[in-house]
Structures are given as C-alpha cells and as structure tokens.
Amino acid sequence: MRILITNDDGYRSEGIRTLLRAAEKIGEVIVVAPEDQQSTMSNALTLYTPIQCKRVQGGFVVGGTPADSVIMATNQLIEGEIDLCLSGVNHGANLGEDVLYSGTVAAAMEAAFAGIPSVAISHVGAVMEEIGQWTEKLCELISKMLEGDVLKKGVLYNVNLPEGLPSQVKGVRMTSLGSRRYTNSIRKTTSYDGTDCYEIGNGNLSWTGSPEADYRAVKAGYISVTPIKLDLTDYAALEGIEGW
C-alpha cells in the first residue's frame, strides 16, 4: 500500500511526524507537504505563479498551499498509484464548519477529488506535545478503517482526536458535522500610522447539532469520524424546482 502524507501545518510539524510514524506501520509512505504554516487556507490554489518543490528525505516540500501539495503529488511528483491519503495531524480541532476553512481537510479533499480514499485527522487538545503520543492509536484506527473496507475510492473522512491521552479514549463514534457560532470575534485595533484595523478571531463560541454531532463526541472523550460528501448539491431542493 502506498500512502501519501500531507498537512497544513508544514512538513516540520509534530503532527505530520506522528502521522508518518503511524502510516509507516501500514505501508510505503511518501510525504508531500507545505513548507510553511498554511492553516485556514481551505482549497486555495497558487495559480499562474511558480511553485517551488524541494526533494527531502521521504518526500517533497512544496512552497504553496495544502491543495497545491496534493495536486503536485498526484500529477507531477509521485509516479504510480496512490492507495490512500492521510492529512494531518492538525494542531487544533476541525469540527463543524471548520471543514470548509481547514487546509488539513482541503488537502484530503483534493486527494478525494483525484479518486484516492482520504482521511483528514486533527487533534482537539491545546497541548501540542500530546500529539506525539497518538502514534499507536492512529495506526490502530487507520488499520481498522482499512479492514472495514470503508476507505473507498473518492471517499473522505474527517477525524478528530479528543483532548487528553490516547489511553483515556472511550472509543470511536461515527458522527455528523455540528454547527458553531462566534460572537464578539472582531477586535478593533490601530496600525502604526493610526489607521483603524480589525482582527478576526477568538470571541465567544457556541455549538448546536444533533446528538451524533462531532463536537459532542470529542467532548465526551471519543474519537469523532465524520464522512464528508464531495457533492454539495442539495438534491431535496433540486427536486422541488424541477418544473421551473
């Protein structure tokens, strides 16, 4: 099995090293990841601008976005078939609407567009050093998904690891996306020349969602696994306007 490893935190991150160690127990691993931090880049592409790609031990470093990295991997840098794409481990949660902003999810999504089974993996905890302890649990989870034949062509799963140690995990839950809302998340500041500026971030966070929502699972100490559809069409609405 040939496994593509990528992320949005950059090829030096603790998360990608952890994922690499887990994936090496499963198959042949090739890393193609951004050179620098690319969080919240979503599916952004670097168009009509040269992208630098450098060969490093075990793979390539790409001077672009997470989506760039996967496009370069699947179309230029890697010869032959790729059987699985693993993106992460992201330093921070990707729950609910985060999947629309996340570079981690976008990288896995780009691979899914190319017909490669893909998994985006994020760690909810705030202590970055805890990520390195998830190697064995990640290997177990990915192996179980492969054995269960859920990783099919073009399928994307979004995985969130709960806060705390792997030994404290209560299990795995199949989940749906929750919905988050921020209030008071814009802060007014002043630039060096006195111009008004604004910062978006933080604020007060609230969640809503079904009993099976992803945020409920990780809060309860479970690994959340959410299948993500690539087709955004609202077919129920489409049926209602067929006569227009």
Image (tube, rainbow, N blue to C red):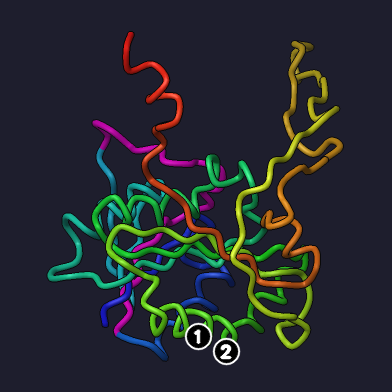
Residue type at mark 1? Cys
Span highlighted in magenta in the image: 28-49
* Apparent side of residue 9 relative to residue 222 in the rendered image (left or right): left
* Apparent side of residue 142 relative to residue 190 in the rendered image (left or right): left
Q: Nearer the viewer, residue 141 or 89?
A: 141
The residue carrying mark 2 is 136
Point 25% across, 40% down: residue: 50
Q: Could you tell me which quadrant the C terminus lies in?
A: top left
Point 38% across, 88% down: residue: 26
Residue type at mark 2? Glu
When asked about the image quadrant of residue 188, the answer is: top right
Mark 2 near mark 1, Cβ–Cβ under 8 Å?
yes
Point 31% across, 74% down: residue: 30
Q: Give the image location of residue 19, x and y in percent.
A: 50, 76
Local secondary structure at mark 1: helix
Local secondary structure at mark 2: helix
Q: Could you tell me which quadrant the N terminus lies in?
A: bottom left
The residue carrying mark 1 is 139
37 vs 119: above or below: above
Q: Is residue 42 magenta?
A: yes
